[in-house]
Amino acid sequence: MTSLADLADVGRDARRGGYSRHGFDRVELELREWFTAEATARGLDVRADRNGNLWAWWGRPGPGAVVTGSHLDSVPGGGAFDGPLGVVSALQAVDLLRSRGFRPARPLAVAVFVEEEGGRFGVACLGTRLMTGAITPERAAALVDADGVGFGDAARAAGFDPSAMGRDDAALTSIGAFVELHVEQGRGLTAPVGVASSILAHGRWRFTFTGEGNHAGATLVEDRRDPVLPASATVLAARAAARGGARATVGRIVPNPGGTNVIASSVDLWLDARASDDATTRAVVAEVVEAAERAAADEGCEVRVTEESYGDTVHFDAGLRDELSAVLGGVPALPTGAGHDAGVLAGHVPTAMLFVRNPTGVSHAPEEFAEDADCAAGVVALAAALEHLAG
Ligand code: HGY
Ligand code: MN
Ligand code: MN
Ligand code: MN
């Protein structure tokens, strides 16, 4: 809790509440410096990979290392735990193992992955997607933030060469097993600590509606081609399409140019859709797209839909999951609707996740919370998992 308190004032968002910390922005760079200093003070050897992820090594780097860690960025106006809890707990687990005189038989590392939330450049888990080749470095470099700054330029300003980014087999083979500790993001966990079984299929789609900008007072309603109307219909269609456990969310809508007395000329809207499997997720999105197209035509507008990112259902390595659950005294396994770097890595290396109870189930919001005692139980569990895997 002391380590989390170290970060309590870094990246507070006075307007939204909570924290706004985004890949390679001033705040995230400050947090990376904090991590480097903390890890170095513990005698860990901190290195950045060519995709902007940080690795703090206890012992000589891989192959076959046991790696733990998470991310330090947040959603806009996010909570204190999503990401940092996994990083802080990893450092605390190292301290705990050391205090017991544990000597890892396999190398052990704490990793910090860049831009996990996609809060700045739009694609979640950018650091691990680059590392695994799930996104090309060219596409990543071309992503732009809300101010028009490209990921490539932001990476360069942070000291990375965007042309050297991309699939990193050396980094992947250095990982023998990856374990990410994370605050649970729903109310599914009633014990202090659990292990993850699966992640929903999920993705993000951008809808751009184009109409005709005009005067709010001088333009008769029947003369309008107002893109806010089909955008609004799309929000309702998303809710209607999310049946049987599927989720569909519109959390970001940008009317352009955005004036109270201006009929917008275009609207950008982002759909986040998730479901248990690929086919269901695709069906939800298809239903929303069809409704958007119909509503756009009714208003004389056009709509263009682009898939910005997608990941199929992740089933975590059942052997590793059961092994860790047993090591931790039979803690429960549960699925999650949230995406994680562990989900991206799971397709490449044996991967597991530990969850720490979230008493209210609130996450991606300033009110996100976990009890001190549960966070401590998380550190003890992570240390036991690392000891088991690296011992
Ligand atoms: O689940 C998410 O939206 C993100 O990957 N954390
Ligand atoms: Mn998150
Ligand atoms: Mn997270
Ligand atoms: Mn005027």
Image (spheres, rainbow, N blue to C red):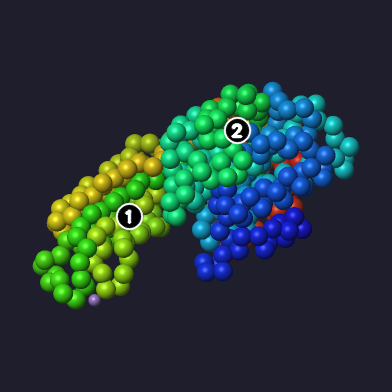
Q: What kind of element bears circle 1?
A: strand
Q: CA distance from mark 1 to mark 2?
A: 32 Å
Q: Is residue 195 visible?
A: no
Q: Position of residue 390 (x, y in %)?
A: 76, 30
Specify the amino acid type for callout 2. Arg
* Label number found at residue 50: 2
Q: Position of residue 16 (x, y in %)?
A: 52, 67
Is mark 1 in CB contact (under 8 Å) with mark 2?
no
Where's ligand 4: which quadrant?
A: bottom left
Q: Is residue 13 left or right of residue 222?
A: right
Give the residue drawn at x 19%, y 76%. Answer: 217
Q: Which residue is mark 1?
A: 268
Give the residue drawn at x 56%, y 58%. Answer: 20
Specify the amino acid type for callout 1. Asp
In what quadrant of the picture does the N terminus appear?
bottom right
Q: What kind of element bears circle 2?
A: loop
